Image (cartoon, rainbow, N blue to C red):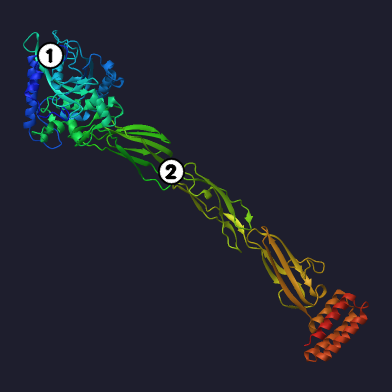
Amino acid sequence: MALRKAWKSTLTHVSLRAACGGPVGTSGAKRSKSNCAVLRLAVALLLGGTLFASTGTAQNLDYNGGAVLGNPAIHNVYMDFSWDSDNPASINRASIDGFTGSLANSIYFNSAGQYGVGSASFTGSNEAGILCPPPIIAGVTDFFAISAWMQCMTVPSPVPFTGTISGIPAPDGNTVYAVYLPTGTTIFDVASSCGSFTAYHFFGGTLVWQFVFPSPVPLLVPQSFAYTVVPMDCAAQAQTNFSLASELDGVSYLASHEIIEASTDPIILTGWIDNSLAGFNADILKAGEAADICEVRGITHLKLPNGPVVAAYWSNADKACVPDVTPPVTTAQLSPTPNAAGWNNTNVTVTFTSTDDLGGAGGVKEIHLTLAGAQTGSNIVSGSSASVTIFTEGTTTVTFFGIDKSGNQEVPNTVTVRIDRTPPSVTCGSPDGLWHANDVAIPCTASDSLSGLANPADASFNLTTSVPVGTETATAFTNGRTVLDVAGNSTTQGPIGPNMVDKKPPTIIINQPMATQYVHSATLVLNYTVTDGGSGVSSFTPTMNGSTTVGGSGLASGQMINLLTTLPLGQNTFAITATDKVNNMSSASVTFTIIVTPQSIIDDVNQLQGSGAISANIAGALLAKLNNALMKRNAGQCGAAANIYSAFINQVMAQTGKGITPAAAAILIADAQYLIAHCP
């Protein structure tokens, strides 16, 4: 503001006369009539504008038709013969000049473009000279003395186009002189410095050399200029009031406040100002200029990114205080979204959306993307949205951040994209072509080099057949198994076959003997089969009553057995045990009974006679007895028959070793005794 927080209508006629009167300071320099006229005009404009400015929108800058600084050219003017000797090192000329250059080259003026204010420049600095000594007496100066001093400092050199008598650049339509008052200097006039105000900006007028058509020689023509005033004592107070890091921060805060207002309203009340505050209370000068609006709203100072502390100022376009020092916020959205484990098995498009808290002239300038890991690359995308497709398998880390149009850069963020499109590798064995007594287990191993196996147990497993007990097959297949990786890719192995599984023992079928009665005189022909439809019969063993031979012969199927001479009367058991080639075992047996009938004993004698075991003459006598006994049995005369069989036995015994062999005799005696015991 002009005369920050003061500039009430207390400028008196006496004060104005003092400004246009005698010498200032100790130099004895006179204020010129032209300087006095400029001051009178300024006061008239100031007071008149305060009372009669047109109505505007509250907290909005209104344009009143006057000039603005299209490209502010800032020149520092130190009201001291030896600034660095009279002020703390922290606010020496180099420090303040450095701040000014940084301010001119920063984003500070960007939003002022809406008011016709473009980029700024820093043109250097000067101290007071002997022709224009500092108007400070005993540490005190005043508004009019400062104004008169600036008139002196801008007096043109008598040599055309060589600047001013003080050495500072001659002003033009972009010039703003930044005047700094040394430590220990108080402004005392219409208000007290660092009390009712801390810094201010105003304007002055001078003459500059120009060629004016049609004059062939340069002429002196009027030129207005803007200037700001910042007392160092007030900068120190600002440091304390706002808890700033250094007194230089206090300087940069106050100076930037006045410089932006001098740029947008160089001839006060004629440029950009909030006309809604016009009136006798002069609020328009306390709260109506660009930086004042923000100060009233409680937004005082900001720290530029990698730059100085500055005063905020109002932006109509943004409806907010600028510059924007808040970085944008950028978010990333993955499509498709990863699974619960953080993996995708397709290409992934990452969409970035950056938002900035300031619209209008602010907003997001660009988004920076850097890819590292499986997929690499980088890109800078203009605007507030961007996208990138991740297609390389593996883990890719995307680092991203937004930069707004004010140059604020957010802290880099990262999003991790994991892609695995490759199914797990599963390796299994194959059928071995052999017969197995039990179900076959085919070993398998699985691995996944990217996302890993979803089930660690899949690293090693078996696929098995499921052949029912009692079944044999050469075409058994295992079960199947699906192996998943963490990304959701799958590999299925199985069924694997054919496998040969034999869970069925050999099949034994005994046709002869049967479980029945055989007469002793009969001949038995063995008839049986041993088969295996699977692995095949490895071995089998037939036995008769536990012996593998009968009458000195084996028991192969088809073998004829003379019951009379090889097997005893009563029960006999024929059995077979068999083993297949995978050691399945089976067994079967038949128990049959050998009996004697009246007819079969007759057949015994005939058979034994035929074999030579009984002589013919004895055989005839024996047969006569047996035929007689047969008739008695058929007649139901068991006792008579028994007597005859007893006589038969006595005769056999008498002829044993003579006409009958002992073996034959034993058979005949046993058979006769059987008949005696079994009648009918």
The picture places residue 463, in percent across and down from the top left corner, at: 55, 53
The x, y position of residue 658, in whole percent, is: 93, 78
Could one spot residue 176 in this view of the protein?
Answer: no
Q: Nearer the viewer, residue 6 or 657?
A: 6
Q: For residue 650, say whether it is visible.
A: yes
For badge 2, the amino acid type reads Arg
Circle 2 residue? 421
Residue 399 placement (x, y as % from top left): 37, 35
Residue 588 sits in quarter: bottom right
Q: Which mark is residue 23?
A: 1
User: Observer-nearest residue: 306 or 361?
Assistant: 306
Q: Is residue 104 left or right of residue 480?
A: left
Where is residue 178 drawn, in percent x and y?
A: 20, 21
- When asked about the image quadrant of residue 473, the answer is bottom right
Occupied quadrant, residue 420: top left
**Residue at (66%, 63%) from the top-left corner?**
506
Please indicate whether residue 514 sits to the left or right of residue 310 in the image.
Answer: right
> In the current view of this chain or complex, which residue is farthest to the front?
138
Q: Residue at x 74, y 68 (%)?
A: 558
- Whether 62 is drawn above or below 544: the answer is above
Q: Secondary structure at mark 1?
A: loop
